[in-house]
Amino acid sequence: MGERKKGLRVVLDTNVLVSALLFSGPLAVIVNLWESGRIIPVLSQETFDEFQRVLSYPKFELTSGEITTLVEQCISYFDVVDVTVQVKGVCRDPHDDKFLSCALSASAVMLVSGDDDLLVLSKYKNVKIISPAEFLDTFKV
């Protein structure tokens, strides 16, 4: 996107992203990492669609206006990439392959996930797959 974006390119899976935005736990620090430019979260259209769909789950009790505001507040910090590398059949859960596709297409260095179906891979091509705790350790937060 813009030249101002010089941070570490990372893919945050949907659960990590939603937790960082909606809850005040340890993952809330991730928002500070992208706001300070230390990381550039990367989304593809498919991962962005899942993110918006999950925000609308009844358990979060967000109105459509709140969801729109939340997305608008954070999207300027994100890069949305076209998927140029399609990954199929790599992850135990085929629905998670979209995160690998996004990471490879964006030349991201890390994929942050709490999902064992992704974590079991630990690395795919040049993308390190790590837990949220390992990710936060990387930044000493």
Image (tube, helix red, strand yellow):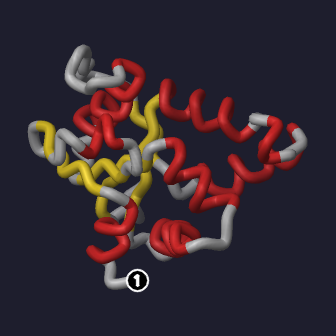
Q: Residue at x 23, y 23 (%)?
A: 85
Q: Residue at x 27, y 55 (%)?
A: 130
Q: Point out the residue furthest to the top here.
A: 88
Q: Quadrant of residue 54?
A: top right
Quadrant holding the C terminus: bottom left
Q: Left or right: where does residue 58 sit relative to residue 2?
A: right
Q: Quadrant of residue 134?
A: bottom left
Q: Left or right: where does residue 49 sit relative to residue 3?
A: right
Q: Nearer the viewer, residue 58 or 13?
A: 58
The three-letter code of the residue at mark 1 reads Val
Q: Left or right: where does residue 60 sit relative to residue 100?
A: right
Q: Residue at x 50, y 27 (%)?
A: 45
Q: Point out the residue furthest to the left here.
A: 125
Q: Residue at x 27, y 45 (%)?
A: 119
Q: Left or right: where does residue 62 sit relative to residue 9?
A: right
Residue 116: image location, x then y, percent = 33, 42
Residue with the mark numbered 1:
141
Q: Nearer the viewer, residue 85 or 123?
A: 123
* Label 1: few (<14), some (14–19) or many (≥20) C-alpha neighbours in 10 Å: few
Residue 124: image location, x then y, percent = 14, 38
Residue 98: image location, x then y, percent = 37, 26
The vertical placement of 64 against 7, above or below, is: above
Q: Nearer the viewer, residue 108 or 3?
A: 108
* Secondary structure at numbered mark 1: loop
The vertical placement of 44 against 4, above or below, is: above
Q: Nearer the viewer, residue 27 or 40?
A: 27
Residue 78: image location, x then y, percent = 50, 51
